[in-house]
Amino acid sequence: RDEVPAERVVHLEDPRLLVELPERSSPAEEPVREEAGGGGAGRGGGRSKRLKPMLLLSFSLPRQPCALPTLARRARPLSAAAVRDAGCERRLLRGVLAEALEKQRRKRFALTEQSGALERSQLPSEAKARAKAVARAEALPLLLRECDAAEAALSDLHARLYERRPDLPALRRAMEELGLEQRLELYDVDRAAMDQWGRPAGFDGLVVDSPRGVPILIGRQSFADPLLRRVARGADLWFQVRASRGSRVLLRTSMRRDLTRSHRECMEAAADLAAYFSPLRRHGEVEVMYTDSRHVAKRGGRVGQLKDGKKIGLLTAHPERAALLAREAQDEQGWPV
């Protein structure tokens, strides 16, 4: 700045102002700077170099507090207690929602049955009974619409519960608005986790229902399953992945007295669960072998294990088909996902 003439220094209070540059001066008026290197002109002597016109802009910025960009902080991982509490809250909400949905389905079924019975039967001849029957028939459509609306609201909350990061406090408030506040206070999560039809006493694994209502027991991965071996009966089938270790799955067809053999869809559901609870969960197709209780190890340290040489047959399982059912069962019964 010291080498620039004062008339070529422009001070701007606002940097957004436009500045018009002065006219270019003539060569005679341009300042000349002598360079060192000798006194005479010519080779080796001192050379003169004309300076180019310069314009120095000086800005004066307002002194205001500047908002520095905030560095994004990595979210702290939740503690084990927080994860456990969130898991218990989710199990509670899911259990109450499932219970309320089942209640609404039964109510709708009963209303539908009443509507059909009124249509098939004739109105009574007595005036008082006739008036009651007519009033009940007129009220049934309204009750069915209310039941369908409540079931739709509960189904929407149930779907929101399985989002990637559900807002559990908001879901709880929505359930309380639907009249489930008292049930949320009284629902026993631990008791509901072990209250499935077909679960034998002392079994700590998962219990899910097949498409035909047959209980499917999924044991924890271990070398032996003496409890499953003890409760298995003649019509029950065992499932296990062929090429790797995994949970043993028992299809308890013997619990259904009306079924003499295991249906294909129930066997495929059990095979999908056996593939899902194995190291081959990410594979598209997995070979699963199955056999009956007569061909399962009965004693020793590997009781309950399946051997490839004693299998009855093989099924091609698809683990992704059992993913939703398995996650729901894990969430409800407190298994680690």
Image (spheres, grey):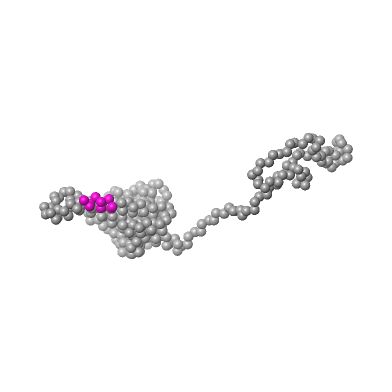
What kind of secondary structure does the magenta stretch mostly adopt? helix
Seen at 31% across and 53% down, the residue is 150
> Magenta residues, as a range?
138-147
Residue 146 is one of the magenta-drawn residues: yes
Number of marks present in the image shown = 0
Measured as percent of width and height from the top left, residue 265 is found at 30, 49
Measured as percent of width and height from the top left, residue 55 is found at 73, 42
Q: Nearer the viewer, residue 182 or 301?
A: 182
Seen at 83% across and 41% down, the residue is 34
Query: Can the viewer see residue 236?
Result: no
Seen at 39% across and 54% down, the residue is 161
Seen at 34% across and 52% down, the residue is 153
Please identify the residue farthest to the right as the structure is shown: 40
Measured as percent of width and height from the top left, residue 43 is found at 85, 36
Measured as percent of width and height from the top left, residue 120 is found at 16, 48
Please identify the residue farthest to the left as the structure is shown: 125
- Location of the C terminus (image quadrant): bottom left
Residue 319 is one of the magenta-drawn residues: no
Q: Nearer the viewer, residue 88 or 23?
A: 23
Rendered view: 252 above or below 49: below
Location of residue 98 (image quadrant): bottom left
Q: Nearer the viewer, residue 123 or 309?
A: 123
Please give left or right for residue 85 compared with residue 2 in the image.
left
Query: Can the viewer see residue 107?
Result: yes
Please give left or right for residue 298 compared with residue 134 in the image.
right
Q: Nearer the viewer, residue 276 or 1?
A: 1
